[in-house]
Image (tube, rainbow, N blue to C red):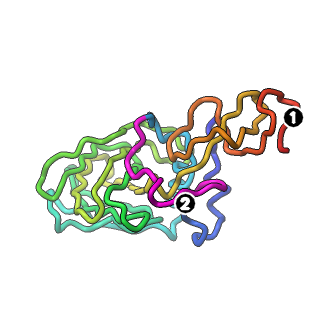
Amino acid sequence: MKRKLWSALLGLSLAACGTMEEGDTESPGQQEQELPAGCTSVDDTNMTDHACVHYGNSADNVNVTANATRTTSAPAISTKHKHYTVTLPAGAEGSVTYVPSATTAGDTTESVAFYLSPSATFTLLTSGGATVTPGLSESITSGCGLSQVVTYDLTVGSTYILALGPVTGNQVRVVPEYLDDNRVRWYRDADGDTYGTSTNSVLTACEPPSGYVNRRFDCNDNDPAIFNC
């Protein structure tokens, strides 16, 4: 079932923005900064819900006019917890830039998901003009209008060029999200009682494996009548 929580989250204070995980945390040395090998989608996730919060909040909107050429001097869309309305040249491609920052001191690589509305041709390039291959590129059903997400592993501090469009109406709305800011711990629920065992879990911003739930404290995961203990 899709977690259509974005409308409820919209009323939350923006001060609450940050790492969206339950309970357990990991030391910087344990954290993964690259897109997990088993990650096949970020569609039905808390990160998508979080992107919808910013997409639906007019106070988070930043209007940007894209450059007509692919250049590192194009306007930046690098501020966290914002959505950008990017106006493209009429009937043509436009470019903006993005510089990833470290979510934890010492990080050198970050996985970043770019949510788009409407779906558009999207090419990410290095400052030297080389095309970067995405780890994931997918159509999504978000419930808020975001319909495409493209996820990359990016080098912290480097300037990237984002080439967008052309699109009908000459505007693309973009919400960048860091996977490390949106990881949730999921717990194995073997008996289907919606509570998972605390001893078998995964921490991810991607869609969790089948049979995992986001609440724990099931002291007997083989008996659906015994949970929350």
- The amino acid type of the residue labelled 1 equals Ile
How packed mark 1 is, by other alpha carbons closer than 10 Å (few <14, some 14-19, many 20 or more), is some
In the picture as drawn, the residue positioned furthest to the right comes out as: 225
Q: Which mark is residue 19?
A: 2
In space, the residues marked 1 and 2 are separated at their CA atoms by 31 Å
* 29 is within the stretch colored magenta: yes
Q: Which secondary structure lies at badge 2?
A: loop
Question: For the residues carrying marks 1 and 2, which lies nearer the camera in this image?
Answer: 1
Residue at image position (46%, 37%) is: 41
- The amino acid type of the residue labelled 2 equals Thr
Q: Which secondary structure lies at badge 1?
A: loop
Residue 7 in view here: no
In the picture as drawn, the residue positioned furthest to the left comes out as: 128
Q: Along the horizontal axis of the image, is 205 left or right of 129?
A: right
Q: Along the horizontal axis of the image, is 215 left or right of 223?
A: left
Residue 79 in view here: yes
Q: Which residue is more in the foreground, 15 or 172?
A: 15
- Magenta region: 19-37
> Which residue in the structure is indicated by mark 1?
226
Residue 218: image location, x then y, percent: 78, 39
* 185 is within the stretch colored magenta: no
Q: Which residue is more in the foreground, 189 or 175?
A: 189
Q: Which mark is residue 161?
A: none
Residue 103: image location, x then y, percent: 43, 63
Q: Is residue 79 above or below residue 134?
A: below
Residue at image position (51%, 70%) is: 59
Quadrant in which the N terminus appears: top right
Quadrant in which the C terminus appears: top right
Q: Is residue 12 above or below residue 146?
A: below
Residue 62: image location, x then y, percent: 40, 68
Q: Is residue 228 above or below residue 128?
A: above
